[in-house]
Image (cartoon, grey):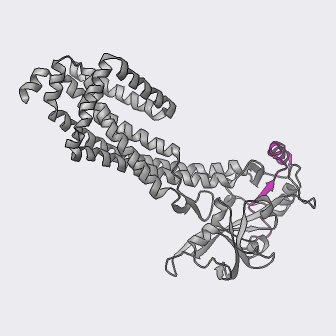
């Protein structure tokens, strides 16, 4: 019964330690490492632990195969985890770069996204005339009524029937003014009233035929691609055409999905939103584009993060068992050595610390290798997915950030901690006489 209670207490302590470890920032980890180093340098038991650790590390060459199991297993866990989380990070960064605090998006009330919003002509006129909107050199408000529809285009590298959905945005001249980050990099802007298209650089990479001078079929009409633009954000995945022509092609009349307005300054947003809310003829929702795209990124980012953590946990369990088996075997082969150390005065704590440090050093090496491989292979790697709140694919690049690399190292050290704890406790509990007699 006593042994059962001790093991139960150990499991509870382990669960608490892992829960704290997950939330621990890197400065706190540095402090813990420094305190551990001081303990090993200036206390008797600490020096004993350092001595035992040194002996264990010096024999790693003799156990190269079994040690490699820990390193390779943990490197795989960290590499896959960081790569999957980098997908969510890249997706989120792309959407967050699309918005800013001095641009507002106005949609029909209770609309979760542009594709669900419909504003009639009278509402658009009143929104554009609302105080707080910046004006150009001619005194005209910098507000862009826009229409968003889905268009099917053949995918690059696919068969003739292999099509994907691209987001077609109907805009006017004002769209270029409210989004100054959108720049033509090839060809020219479309002419108003013409079936001409400017395509985002990301869309041009995904879909066939989106090159200047080429014609594509949208709806029942042929459109001519006249330019390619780049923005470095979600707009790169879109195709732009004249709003009136897009509306005629898709039978949307004079309605639009949203109005994107450039504000006089970020501080003008609250007054602008209040003025729209106070207008009894309008039922609209207003947000900054920064807040709007942040909301759109939350759902997909959460899904990708959950997927990454789930896959990582499954792989981590396998790596933990690999570490446990390896360290149990290492403790068994060193049973006489450990028993001798115990017999000449080494206590159980230094033995526990030594075995765990050895495992965590191997885990740290695996984490560094896995993180480095993830950064080398996946950082900046292009991907695309159907984005929330849109009707087309969003092109983005995976982003392996320092924060994700730190997360990977924390997972590696956690695996090493669990993998070394139970073999270390067994080594410390093993009676000296039993160990010497068995060998």
| Residue 256 horizontal/vertical position (percent) | 76, 64
| Residue 160 horizontal/vertical position (percent) | 52, 82
What residue appears at the point 64 percent right and 51 percent down from the top-left corner? Answer: 96
Residue 5 makes an appearance in the image = no
Front residue of this view, candidates 108 and 348: 348
**Magenta segment: does it hold 77?**
no
Q: Is residue 249 above or below residue 281?
A: below
**Magenta segment: does it hold 253?**
yes
Q: Quadrant of residue 61?
A: top left
Figure disc tally: 0
Front residue of this view, candidates 339 and 434: 339
Left or right of residue 41, residue 115 in this image: right
Position of the C terminus by quadrant: top left
Tell me where the magenta segment starts and ends, as one range.
251-279
Q: Quadrant of residue 250?
A: bottom right
Q: Is residue 402 above or below residue 243?
A: above
Residue 248 makes an appearance in the image = yes
What residue appears at the point 64 percent right and 81 percent down from the top-left corner? Answer: 216
Left or right of residue 170, residue 367 in this image: left
Position of the N terminus by quadrant: top left
Q: Farthest residue in the right direction? A: 138
What residue appears at the point 86 percent right and 57 percent down from the top-left corner? Answer: 128
Left or right of residue 136, residue 242 in this image: left
What residue appears at the point 27 percent right and 31 percent down from the top-left corner? Answer: 54
| Residue 331 horizontal/vertical position (percent) | 19, 33
| Residue 308 horizontal/vertical position (percent) | 44, 49
Front residue of this view, candidates 336 and 202: 336
């Amino acid at each position: 019964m006593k042994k059962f209670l001790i093991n139960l207490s150990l499991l509870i302590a382990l669960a608490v330690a892992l829960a704290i470890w997950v939330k621990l920032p890197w400065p706190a980890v540095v402090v813990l490492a420094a305190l551990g180093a001081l303990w090993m340098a200036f206390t008797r038991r600490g020096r004993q632990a350092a001595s035992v650790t040194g002996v264990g590390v010096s024999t790693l060459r003799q156990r190269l195969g079994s040690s490699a199991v820990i390193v390779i297993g943990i490197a795989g866990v960290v590499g896959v985890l960081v790569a999957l989380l980098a997908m969510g990070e890249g997706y989120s960064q792309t959407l967050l770069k699309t918005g800013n605090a001095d641009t507002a998006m106005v949609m029909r009330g209770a609309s979760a996204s542009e594709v669900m919003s419909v504003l009639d002509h009278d509402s658009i006129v009143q929104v554009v005339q609302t105080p707080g909107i910046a004006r150009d050199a001619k005194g005209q408000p910098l507000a862009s009524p826009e229409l968003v529809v889905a268009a099917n285009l053949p995918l690059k590298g696919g068969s003739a029937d292999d099509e994907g959905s691209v987001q077609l945005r109907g805009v006017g001249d004002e769209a270029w003014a409210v989004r100054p980050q959108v720049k033509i990099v090839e060809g020219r802007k479309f002419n108003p009233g013409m079936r001409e298209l400017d395509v985002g650089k990301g869309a041009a990479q995904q879909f066939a035929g989106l090159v200047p001078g080429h014609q594509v079929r949208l709806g029942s009409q042929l459109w001519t691609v006249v330019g390619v633009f780049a923005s470095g954000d979600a707009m790169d995945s879109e195709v732009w055409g004249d709003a009136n022509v897009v509306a005629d092609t898709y039978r949307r009349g004079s309605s639009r999905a949203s109005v994107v307005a450039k504000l006089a300054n970020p501080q003008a947003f609250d007054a602008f939103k209040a003025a729209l809310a106070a207008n009894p003829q309008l039922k609209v929702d207003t947000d900054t584009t920064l807040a709007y795209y942040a909301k759109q990124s939350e759902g997909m980012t959460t899904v990708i993060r959950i997927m990454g953590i789930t896959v990582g946990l499954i792989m981590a369990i396998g790596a933990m068992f690999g570490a446990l088996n390896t360290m149990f075997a290492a403790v068994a082969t060193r049973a006489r050595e450990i028993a001798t150390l115990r017999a000449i005065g080494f206590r159980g704590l230094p033995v526990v610390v030594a075995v765990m440090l050895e495992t965590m050093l191997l885990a740290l090496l695996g984490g560094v290798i896995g993180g480095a491989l993830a950064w080398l292979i996946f950082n900046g790697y292009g991907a695309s997915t159907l984005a929330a709140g849109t009707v087309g694919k969003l092109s983005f690049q995976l982003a392996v950030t320092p924060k994700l690399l730190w997360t990977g190292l924390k997972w590696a050290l956690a695996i090493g901690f669990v993998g070394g704890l139970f073999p270390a406790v067994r080594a410390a509990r093993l009676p000296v006489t039993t160990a010497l007699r068995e060998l």
